[in-house]
Image (cartoon, grey):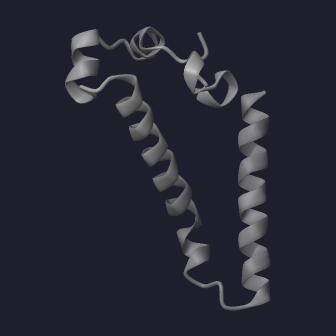
Amino acid sequence: MDLSVRERGVAAVMLDDVMARTSTSKSRLFHYFPAGKDELLLAVARFEADQVLADQQPYLRRLDTWEAWEQWRDVVVKQYETQASRAE
C-alpha cells in the first residue's frame, strides 16, 4: 500500500497504513505520538520542512546577487521536478 500523503491526501492516510508500512505496533505508535494521527502528521510536516530548509541553506545564505537568486531558483525547481518524476 502506498503511503504517499502527497498522492492520497492527509485524510486518506490511516494509522493502520502507517503501522503496516513501518511494521510498528499500535502501542509503539501511540508511545511516540500520544495524540494520534494529527501529532504524527505534524511531525512529518516538520521533518519535511526541516529537510527543505537544510537542502536550500547553502543557497539561502548567499542571496546577494541576481545570479545567486537564479541559481537558487534553478536548484529548487530541479529538486521538485526530480521528486515529481520519482512519484510517478
Say if 65 sits above or below 80 in the image: below
x and y percent of residue 83 in the render? 71, 41
Q: Quadrant of residue 66?
A: bottom right
- Residue at 60% from the left image edge and 85% from the top image edge: 62
Horizontally, residue 40 falls left or right of residue 21, namely left
- Please tell me whether residue 1 is drawn above or below residue 5 in the rendered image: above
Q: Residue furthest bottom?
A: 65
Would you say 53 lies left or right of 31 here?
right
Task: Name the quarter where the N terminus is drawn.
Answer: top right
* Residue 16 spot, x, y in % from top left: 43, 8
Please say if 14 is above or below 66.
Answer: above
Residue 6 at x, y percent in the picture: 65, 31
Q: Residue at x 63, y 25 (%)?
A: 9
Seen at 44% across and 33% down, the residue is 41
Image quadrant of residue 69?
bottom right
Between 77 and 31, the residue placed more toward the observer is 31
